[in-house]
Image (spheres, rainbow, N blue to C red):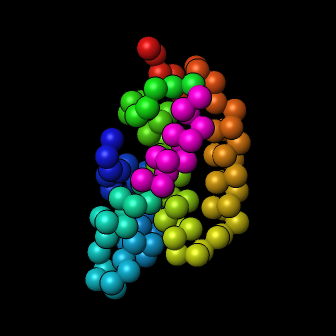
């Protein structure tokens, strides 16, 4: 997966939140560039922990896609310098889950 789609991301955020967090030029539209950068940060986060147990790049199985969706959401907030308690709690929870990864955690078969 090289990018995240709006359909995937709207499963964890509203379209207005996505626009607000990506629209640096005040166009009223989603910036795909900003979205791609946040997604790339999310992938790096998961890869950092997964590399000890899996070959990279990780396949787009449901568990990996969910980590990417949730982490992308966090990174969109972080890039704005906005750290709501809900987002910080989510990120900390995701970090704990990533720290506990095993070779079977993500449901990836060899």
Q: Which x, y percent locates residue 89?
A: 70, 56
Q: Which residues are magenta?
A: 40-52
Q: Position of residue 104 (x, y in %)?
A: 58, 19
Judge whether 80 appears above or below 5 on screen: below
Quarter of the image for the N terminus: give it: top left
**Residue found at the very far bottom of the displayed protein:** 26
> Who is closer to the viewer here, 25 or 43?
43
- With 103 as the anchor, is 40 left or right in this view? left
Return the residue nearer the eye: 14 or 55.
55
Residue 40 image point, x, y percent = 42, 53
- Residue 16 visible (yes or no): no
Residue 48 appearing in the image: yes
Report x, y in % for residue 84. 65, 69
Q: Is residue 41 magenta?
A: yes
Q: Is residue 11 above or below residue 17?
A: above
x 40%, y 61%: residue: 37
Count of marks placed on residues:
0
In what quadrant of the picture does the C terminus appear? top left
Tell me the residue at 55%/59% (across/down). Answer: 74
Q: In the figure, is residue 38 to the left or right of 91?
A: left
Find out whether residue 70 is within the magenta segment: no
Query: Which residue is drawn at the image coordinates 49% and 65% (left, top)?
Result: 76
Left or right? Give the position of 1 relative to 97: left
The residue most toward the top is 110
Prevailing SS of the magenta stretch = helix
Q: Is the residue 38 above or below the residue 109 in the image?
A: below
């Amino acid at each position: 997966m090289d990018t995240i789609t709006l359909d995937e991301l709207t499963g964890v955020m509203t379209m207005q939140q996505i626009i607000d967090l990506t629209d640096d030029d005040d166009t009223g539209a989603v910036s795909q560039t900003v979205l791609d950068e946040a997604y790339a940060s999310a992938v790096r986060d998961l890869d950092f922990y997964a590399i000890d147990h899996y070959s990279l790049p990780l396949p787009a199985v449901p568990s990996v896609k969910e980590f990417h969706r949730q982490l992308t959401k966090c990174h969109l907030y972080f890039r704005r310098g906005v750290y709501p308690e809900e987002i910080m709690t989510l990120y900390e929870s995701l970090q704990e889950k990533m720290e506990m990864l095993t070779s079977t955690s993500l449901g990836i078969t060899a």
